[in-house]
Image (tube, grey):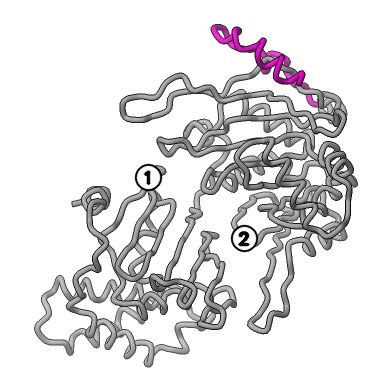
Amino acid sequence: MDLQERLNASSSLSDAPATADPFADVKNRIHMAVIGELGPQLYSDDIDEATLRERVKAAIGAHLSKEAGLSHTDRVTIAEAVTDDILGHGPLERLLLDDTVSEIMVNGPHDIWVERGGRLYQVPIHFTDSSHLRRIINKIVAQIGRRIDESSPMVDARLPDGSRVNAIIPPLSLSGPLVTIRKFGETRLNLDDMIRIGTLSEPTVDFLSLCIRAELNILISGGTGSGKTTLLNALSTAVPDDQRIITIEDAAELKLNQRHVLRLESRPSNIEGEGEIAIRELVRNSLRMRPDRIIVGEVRGPEALDMLQAMNTGHDGSLSTVHSNSTRDALARVETMVLMAGYDLPLKAIRAQVASALDLIVHLERLEDGSRRVMQITEVQRMESDVVTLQDIFEFHIDHVTAERQVVGSLRPTGLRPGFLAKFQKHGIDLPIEMFQIPGGHLAAAAGHVAKASR
């Protein structure tokens, strides 16, 4: 039975703990023995990964040869499990290597779920007990110099490939140790891949690529798991290779291939509550580093004010993401986060700052069928009275939903031309007007969009 079949079959399993591992004592005994023998070598920079793996396997094999009553299949299974525990991430290793798994959710040692294709499945994989799970959590957070224990029972971390990890343990968790891993694969999706998977259409990819080259300030909005960081990574491929780019993140996920990229990562406070370096401080410091573009992985606090000021003081072409349910909600969230900076600014001044700084909002949603689609590409226009006006340039239309609950639709122009054409002219970029023409058969919607934009 392949992994997909096992996942489907296991989706109906109950939440009862899995059957106790009959080889748990053997695994623990061999694990501790190998750690005792090779301890210093496991953390030495002088030994390459392949050599270290061979030494670990040899040590495990030597100890297994002393165990009586084990079949060849059992010995192979135990050797793989102990190797994954020592060098990898235990039972999670095979899920981390599976490119079809986008998220891993550990609800205690015996209840593990994954997301595949936007849907959740329970998997027939489990840890020996809570201490086994805690050991793997400690290993993950120690890789980036962080800690988790009863006095600091919650942590955000990342794996070497950039995957985001959140862990929470008792006493905050009443269900035992909990781990959520948002996978971030080695293969970065580009704009062509965005067309292939249906997130964007070919005309919108051309439009957004030109917007990046014209140094428009772009905000990507969407809910949790809607694909904001993936789209941000894809859009970054359009940034010219000769520009100096600074990325600022909570947990380093962005992977830019340009030659001149500087990566900054915030730091949480230590156990004494000291030493925190917030994203806001990194944004302000980046202005002294002569950036051509600033890319903030996600705006979620008072750094929104510093980001808007950077966009308004010559750092055009900046990119960022924000959690929101719509483009209008994205602006409201930015306003709220600016107020979190602690300055008594009038709302009209904040909105004027937002309208001046932002040029474009790209809004994503994860639909019922699990697909991630760009629903709106919206221009941020001017202030009218006390309101920032928005104008949809492209909008996703749902044609129908199939019997299998697959959403069929496309991202189409609204027929409205953006007002920032002068920025394209300044950079010598020709923006084809045909890009914004409504395709045949959809002209009836034009009047509604014009009326909407005029409000």
In this rendered view, identify the residue nearer to me: 148 or 66. 148
Q: Which secondary structure, mark 1?
A: strand
Q: Which mark is residue 324?
A: none
Start-end of magenta stretch? 429-455
Q: Is residue 146 above or below residue 32?
A: above
Q: Amino acid at mark 2?
A: Ala
Q: Which residue is mark 1?
A: 119
Quarter of the image holding residue 104?
bottom left
In this rendered view, identify the residue nearer to me: 290 or 145. 145
Q: Is residue 48 above or below residue 36?
A: above
Q: Amino acid at mark 1?
A: Arg
* Residue 130 in sight: yes
In this rendered view, identify the residue nearer to me: 69 or 309. 309
Instruction: Kindly identify the residue that appears in the image at 52 percent across and 31 percent down.
Output: 195
Q: CA distance from mark 1 to mark 2?
A: 26 Å
Q: Is residue 297 above or below residue 451?
A: below
* Residue 48 in sight: no
Q: Is residue 348 magenta?
A: no
Q: Which residue is mark 2?
A: 252
Q: Is residue 444 magenta?
A: yes
Instruction: Tell me if mark 1 has few (under 14), some (14-19) or many (20+) residues whose alpha carbon lies within 10 angstroms of its own.
Output: few
